[in-house]
Image (cartoon, grey):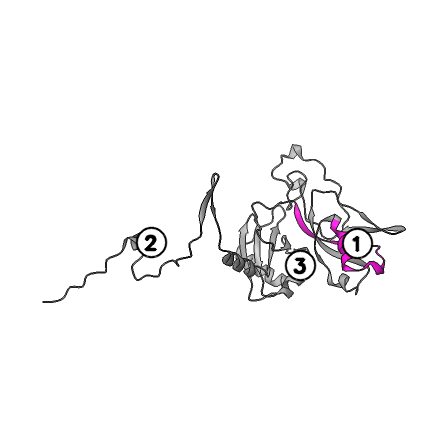
Amino acid sequence: MPSTVFPQKSSFADVLAGSQPNAPREEIYKEMVATRKGEFLSVTLDTTLVKRGVEELQNSLIVRLILAKGEEPYSLEDLARKLEATWNIYGGWKLVPIGRGYYNVQLPNLEDIDRIMGRSSWSMKPGVVWVQRWVRDFNPYKTDTSIAQVWVQLFEIPMEYFQAPIIHALASPLGTVLKIDDRTKDRSMCHYARVLIELDMKQNFEEYIMFEMEGHYLFASVKYESLPPFCKGCGIVAHNLGDCRMLKPMFRGPEAKAPPRV
């Protein structure tokens, strides 16, 4: 009597998963604790996984592409090719869209990051890319869109004050200090001190910083490198007031006084 081969019976879990018993399944992850806190469900994350995710993004940047009115947007592939040519990086990097015109750029080494961060913006023709260091918990949907990372130059500082703690103190009233240029730190170039700060574009732009010592005081003049376009109407870094799509033309006023530029 010939034998009959019956198909293996699928389990209930297999049916729910839409897979066959021998097909690869989604990896089973360690269960994390979920509790209700008020009206919200809250999940306590595994700190090991969080640490892993943070470490994976240490060598990365946040970039935003700004196009002028009428300029053709890039596809992801075209933007990647343009950045490769502009930054002179080939292989071993990744461009990931994360929403609202922001991208995460993962780079293979810190040297590339420092080189790219040497400028606040890069001309793409068309468009301009603004860059900043990746920070933990960066959320493009909740980030303050009036914040920009900008290099500032502090002039008229005598050479004896070119010390990293002093330069940091002088730049701090302008915004959050992120980095002091290497040539400023090692005093190989003392024409001016160069500092990268996180700047709120809604604030007043200071033109001078006074610094005091016992018995006398001095002034450092401030210049801002390549400031991004900023709309005083909607409070967003990306366009000027005259190009704002959120405001009707009849409500558009004159541009505010521009801060000193380099």
Horizontal arrangement in the rendering, residue 93 relative to residue 199 (left or right): left
Give how far across and how far down residue 35 sits, in percent.
45, 45
Image quarter in which the N terminus is found? bottom left
Q: CA distance from mark 1 to mark 3?
A: 18 Å
**Does label 3 or label 2 sit earlier along the sequence?**
2
Horizontal arrangement in the rendering, residue 159 relative to residue 176 (left or right): right
* Residue numbers of the magenta segment: 145-172
Determine which residue is flagged by label 3.
117
Determine which residue is flagged by label 2.
17
Q: CA distance from mark 1 to mark 2?
A: 62 Å
Q: Is label 3 or label 2 in front?
A: 2
Q: Amino acid at mark 1?
A: Leu
Determine which residue is flagged by label 1.
154
Give how far across and how far down residue 229 sits, in percent.
68, 46
Give how far across and how far down residue 249 sits, in percent.
64, 35
| Element marked by disc 2 | helix
Q: Residue at x 65, y 41 (%)?
A: 235
Query: Residue most toward the left?
Result: 1
Horizontal arrangement in the rendering, residue 182 relative to residue 215 (left or right): left
Q: Residue at x 67, y 44 (%)?
A: 230
Q: Amino acid at mark 2?
A: Ala
